[in-house]
Amino acid sequence: MKRLWSRLGVRAASVSLLLAGLVGGVYVGQTQDFQEQSAETALVVQANADEIQLLKARQADHAAARAYRSQAEDAAASKAAAEVKAAAGKARTLEKKAIAEEKKAKEEAEEKEAEENGGPVPFTGDIPESCDEYSGSRKIGCALMLDKGFKLDQFPCLDKLWKKESGWNYKATNRSSGAYGIPQALPGTKMASAGDDWKTNPATQIKWGLGYIKGRYNTPCAAWNHSQNVGWY
């Protein structure tokens, strides 16, 4: 009987030891697993932190690169705009110069042709805005000149011509030649074709004088040019 209990005791002890070993092994295994999991978690966290830092660094680099490109593009655009503006200004200057040279050459050619052929001579001085700038016989002369079909730019030539001939005096008489009136018709009786009052009416004299100029010289400026060259018209 005693032996039986002894055997049972030994067996119980063995079972207890076995159970304790199992429990301890399980605990130790769980502890090791936990430690390993903790280590792995720490590595993952560190890796994530490193990756986040790397992403931030890359984002900062990309932002800096974009800012640099933007500044470079703005600078290039400003430079291009300045070059375009300068080129346009230079082109306008050259164009104006070319136009002025062409105009001058055209005027010189017209004047030369007029001198050679007795054609119209353009007036290059100041042009009045209207006949209201004048008074007396000159105002009448300006209005009748326009009515005759001449342009306003011709009146300065007519004004100079008849200032030289008669001072716009409808009673002006050249004692040596007998020329009479504002246009200094020779003889004065020629002006009767424009009206019986040719001796006393400036308008009648001016009408005749304009007809004479148009028939012989085409324009008042051509008549004035001829007068300057030879002393009469």
Image: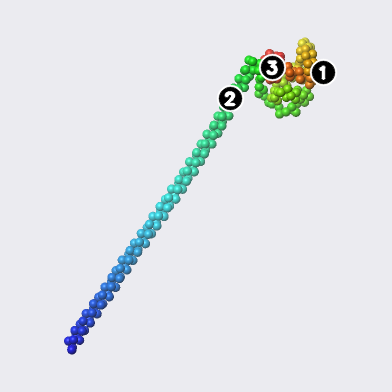
The picture quadrant where one finds residue 153 is: top right
- Residue position marked by numbered label 2 in the rendering: 102
Farthest residue toward the bottom? 1
Image point (43%, 52%), residue name: 60
Please tell me whether residue 75 is drawn above or below residue 196 in the rendered image.
below
Q: Secondary structure at mark 2?
A: helix
* Amino acid found under the numbered disc labelled 3: Tyr
* Residue closer to the observer: 61 or 132: 132
The residue closer to the viewer here, 167 or 99, is: 99
**Does residue 167 show up?**
no
Q: In the rendered image, which quarter is residue 105 located in?
A: top right
Amino acid type of the residue tagged 2 in the rendering: Glu
Task: Left or right? Give the position of 178 relative to 218.
Answer: right
Count neighbours of disc 1 (C-alpha within 10 A) and say few if under 14, some if 14 to 19, many if 20 or more. few
Among the two numbered marks 3 and 1 on one chain, the one whose residue lies closer to the N terminus? 1
Give the spatial CA distance, label 3 vs label 2: 26 Å
- Give, as a three-letter code, the residue at label 1: Asp
Disc number for residue 61: none
Q: Identify which residue, 150 or 31, lies in the foreground.
A: 150
**Whole-percent x and y of residue 148?**
73, 22
Question: Residues at badges 3 and 1 in contact (C-beta under 8 Å)?
Answer: no
Where is mark 1, residue-wise? 197
Which residue, given by chain and number where applicable, does mark 3 sit on? 217
Q: Is residue 109 visible?
A: yes
